[in-house]
Image (cartoon, rainbow, N blue to C red):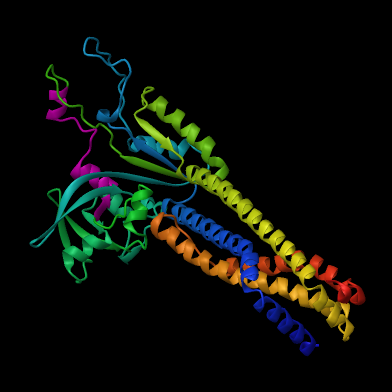
Amino acid sequence: MFKYIKRNILLAIEGIAQNKLRALLTALGIIFGVFSVVAMLAIGNGAKKSILDQLKIIGTNNIVIKSIPPDKKTSDDESDEKETKEAFSYGLNMSDVKSIQSIIPDVESISIETKTDTKILYNKTSIKSKCMGVNNDFFSVNNLNVKRGSLFTSYHSIEGSNVCILGANAAARLFLGKDPIGKYVKAKHVIFKVIGVLEKRQVSSERLSKLKVNSYRNIIFVPIESYILRIDNKQRIGSEDIKRNSRQKTKKKNYHQLDKIIVKVKETKAMEPSASLISKLLLRRHNDQADFEVELPELLIKQQQNTQETLNFILAVIAGISLLVGGIGIMNIMLASVLERIKEIGLRRSIGATEKDIIYQFLFEAIAISLAGGVIGVILGIAGAKLIAQYADIATVISFGSIMLSFVIAVGIGIIFGIMPARKAAKMDPITALRTE
């Protein structure tokens, strides 16, 4: 049986070799079709991986509440001639966090953060940084892990202890390979004991920048209670507040105690209703002052995913049409080949070839052309996907499954569109075929 099939395969290859140009032109449709399939799947897989990476970075089921500083707020009715007094608001503060915890159902964790520019000092080494007041939920919500040391304890929070956790780059630049745990650094004129160092995120800075996510590599983290007590409490009344309330025109002070709150809910379906409830709660607490904004980054990414899936579907349709055109081209050329080789068919039949032999010969020719087109198409598809990733700044992922799928499609096209010409050739009467001029 194997020798039988091998003989017919060799005859098919011989037939193709005698008409190389025709075979190449026949294969062009398959080449472009398979190229489209490989490139389309690479773009689709790349988009899927990119979206999963984004979700991994920003976290799932997160509701982000950001403060809007006074200098960022705009009002349509502002004018030099007429000044309108805004209702008083405390801004985002720790009391808001407690209200959210007690009123909003299905809350899994709440991340709190506020920050200021600073320099971190250790011995004679100084680096520019930001000092962030956070709670332990901040690290879990933002997918940040401690590489050495530990997170803050309840004692640190209750006492407002002078302890800190350093970002990976900050620790490396300050301590130059030495163990920073237990050492003391200075930030904002306050001395902090280092109790932990974060693990470096394995994500490029460019990707983080596109997602508007901080790498947290050069940051000094302190307990939120320590930050409010020792570094900055924007709700504390001081001389600047008195000046601001005088007749002299001074720049409005950022009155928000917290810069950002991230509420993580237990289920995705609870995100939108929880976000709506949080917005209403905060508006009531802030005297109807919209000095905050509520975002659902996961839903925005999922909208992007839906858009990408629609685009992938369109690309798949285009690739399918290309393959269909390629298949029709194979069928047409093979039918023409049958008509050109009538005498050859008649001669083979007269010396003992069966209908099955003739079917296998022409069917294997169609499959061989399709397979050759598939190989070339896969090579071009891989090269095309890499060029797209390099020059179009679009993530692409080439998988073994997509390559195998392309080969299966190529062989399938050869069988489907090669069977009809093969059967037509096999059904010819050998005597009539030999008499044909």
Give coordinates of residue 148: x percent, y percent: 30, 67
77 is within the stretch colored magenta: no
Against 385, residue 429 (above or below) is below
Can residue 15 be seen in this snapshot? yes
Could you tell me which residue is drawn at 48 percent across and 53 percent down? 51
Residue 320 at x, y = what percent?
65, 55
What's the residue at 66%, 67% (across, down)?
410
Residue in the foreground of this view, choosing between 329 and 249? 329
Location of the C terminus by quadrant is bottom right
Name the residue furthest left.
Answer: 124
Q: Tell me if 102 is positioned left or right of 318 in this view.
A: left
Q: Quadrant of residue 40?
A: bottom right
Look at the image and tell me in which quarter the N terminus lies: bottom right
Within the magenta stretch, is there residue 232? yes
Name the residue at 91% across, 73% down.
432
Q: Quadrant of residue 3?
A: bottom right
Left/right placement of residue 208 relative to residue 241 reads right
Residue plotted at (58% across, 72% down): 375
**Badge count:** 0
Q: Quadrant of residue 282?
A: top left
Foreground pick, 189 / 177 = 177
Q: Is residue 183 visible?
A: no
Residue in front for this viewpoint, 341 or 129: 341
Q: Position of residue 345 (x, y in %)?
A: 82, 77
Q: Name the one closer to the observer, 334 or 280.
A: 334
Q: Is residue 264 above or below residue 426?
A: above
Q: Most extreme residue toward the front, as rendered?
A: 437
Taking the image as shown, residue 258 lies to the left or right of residue 360, namely left
Q: What span is in magenta?
A: 219-244
